[in-house]
Image: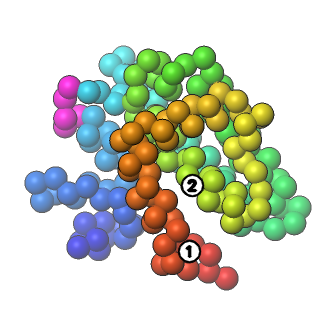
Amino acid sequence: MLLQSNPVHKKVPVLVQDGRPIAESLVILEYIDEAWKGYPLLPEDPSERAKTRFWARFTDEKCVLGAWAACCAKGHEREKAIESAQESLSFLEKQIEGKKFFGGETMGLLDLVVGSLPNWIEFLEEHGGMKLLDEEKFPSLYEWAQKFINIPIINFIMQFQVNFILSPSFLIISFKP
């Protein structure tokens, strides 16, 4: 089913709606925003929508991949990769400063995208022997992350992410020599 639903990347997540697959996290979130009305994930203003999309892609391309690169790098390259990952996190720190959520008072698409980081970074920190999301360097982002993962429905869903990350098949695939 996965290969049929996402034959290009052959990975999850895939949302199947009315027999039609929609692949990739950001695409799925944008689809949900457009398909299900009543609780918008993206701002109404086109300029703010574009800005939110930019920061969502930045999170995927720079923060997630940067954290992974820091975990996998060795020696001097590792220090450079950690600095680069933390530089990316510093941009998110500036975006969340003084706000309850990235979009202001209500949770939106960017919160859901950045919300995948806390467990993932914690896993990489533990298995990579490094510190990325430092409470002193990133007080606003750290505080937001703690509040976000303690929202009851988010906490419930995060348990599935933690269980997946800690599953033997994920560890074998992720940390192949």
Instruction: Identify residue for label 1.
Output: 171
Query: Which amino acid, mark 1?
Result: Leu
Please identify the quadrant where the C terminus is shown: bottom right
In the visual, does 102 lie left or right of 23? right
Q: Is residue 91 visible?
A: no
Instruction: Identify residue for label 2.
Output: 120
- Mark 1 is surrounded, within 10 Å at the Cα level, by few (under 14), some (14 to 19) or many (20 or more) other residues, namely few
Which residue is at a point 36% across and 28% down the rendered structure image? 42
The quadrant in which residue 46 appears is top left
Where residue 84 appears, x then y in whole percent?
Answer: 75, 47
Q: Is residue 139 above or below residue 167?
A: above
* Helix, strand or loop status at disc 1: helix
Q: Main secondary structure of the magenta part?
A: loop
Which residue is at a point 62% across and 59% down the rendered structure image? 123
Where residue 144 appears, x then y in whole percent?
Answer: 57, 31
Q: Is residue 135 above or below residue 126?
A: above
Q: Is residue 140 above or below residue 146?
A: above
- Mark 2 is surrounded, within 10 Å at the Cα level, by few (under 14), some (14 to 19) or many (20 or more) other residues, namely some
Please identify the quadrant where the N terminus is shown: bottom left
Chain part drawn in magenta: 34-38
The quadrant in which residue 78 appears is bottom right
Q: Is residue 103 visible?
A: yes
Asked whether 146 or 131 is in front, the reply is 146
Which residue is at a point 70% across and 57% down the rendered structure image? 125
Tally the numbered discs: 2
Residue 93 part of the magenta-drawn span: no
